[in-house]
Structure formats: structure tokens, C-alpha cells
Amino acid sequence: MHEISELEGRGGLRIRFVEDDDGALAVLELEMPRSAPLVTDVHQALFAIGVHISNVQVSVRGDCVVERLSVAERDGSPLAAGRHLDVQIAVMEVVQRRLVDSVRPGVIGARNAAPPFAGQAVG
């Protein structure tokens, strides 16, 4: 599992990339303040890269909204290993555009993250 948290100046944002037992990315969990409208943009970003959201669970914890998205390829098969980075980049671009750049430059901290995020070129 990879987790992105600690977005300076916005508090409470947490993004988890949860893999299934076979190592395929299966769930994307977004925990954000109610005042951070991020969900629609994430859905659109995933659709744009061909990721299917097969199930959505939404709950409220205090002042935060938690959304768990079950993700797969468009044909319903598990996301290929090479697509994990695509999903992470798409989500982090939304975070960068909607939360960091719109308020002020901030810091995104990553815990247990293998690849770098947020604007670094891959290749």
C-alpha cells in the first residue's frame, strides 16, 4: 500500500493506493476535508486514462469524507502492474491542480511510496 498524506495548508488529505493479494492495484481511498471538492476531478482523471471504477463506498468521519474506489481496467480485469504509476500520476496531478496550486505552493509528503510523485518525469 502506498499512502500520500500531509498536504500542507489543507490538513486531513490522505490518499491510499491499496493492492490486492496478487499485487494488483485494487482500491483507491481518498480521505479529504468536506471543503476539498476533489472526488469529481479524480473520477474524470481515472476515466481519461481508461480506468474503470467498479464500486464506490462513501462515508463521513468527523469533518472528512472518505471515498473508496474499486478500480480495474475497462474490461473489468485487474489493473496491470504497469498501470499503477499511471493511476498515481493522474491522482497526484488532480491534487496538485486543485489543492496545492489553487491555494499556495505546499508540500506533499509520501509514506512507503516506491516511485516519486507530483510532476517528476518518468522514463
Image (cartoon, rainbow, N blue to C red):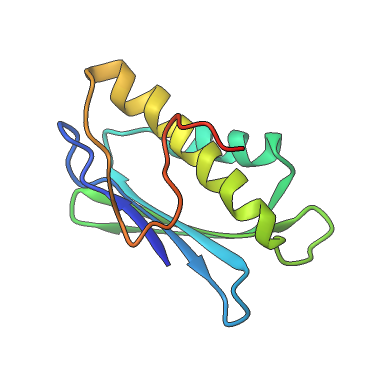
How many marks overall? 0
Residue lying at the far front in this picture: please name it. 123
Is residue 11 or residue 54 the one in the foreground?
A: 11
- Seen in the picture, residue 18 relative to 43 is either above or below; the reply is below
- Is 109 on the left-hand or right-hand side of 11? right
Q: Is residue 93 above or below residue 63?
A: above
Screen quadrant of the N terminus? bottom left
Q: Position of residue 85 (x, y in %)?
A: 57, 49
Name the residue located 63 percent from the left edge and 69 percent from the top edge: 24
User: In screen coordinates, is 71 left or right of 29?
Assistant: right
- Residue 72, picture quadrant: bottom right
Q: Quadrant of the C terminus?
A: top right
What's the residue at 41%, 23% (across, down)?
97
Q: Quadrant of residue 66?
A: bottom left
Residue at 67% x, 52% y: name it. 83
Q: Residue furthest right?
A: 75
Residue 12 lies, in percent from the top left, at 21, 47
Residue drawn at the location 42% of the way across and 44% of the way down? 116
Q: Is residue 59 above or below residue 92?
A: below
Q: Position of residue 106 (x, y in %)?
A: 21, 28
Q: Is residue 20 positioned above or below 55 on the image?
A: below
123 or 11, which is in the foreground? Answer: 123
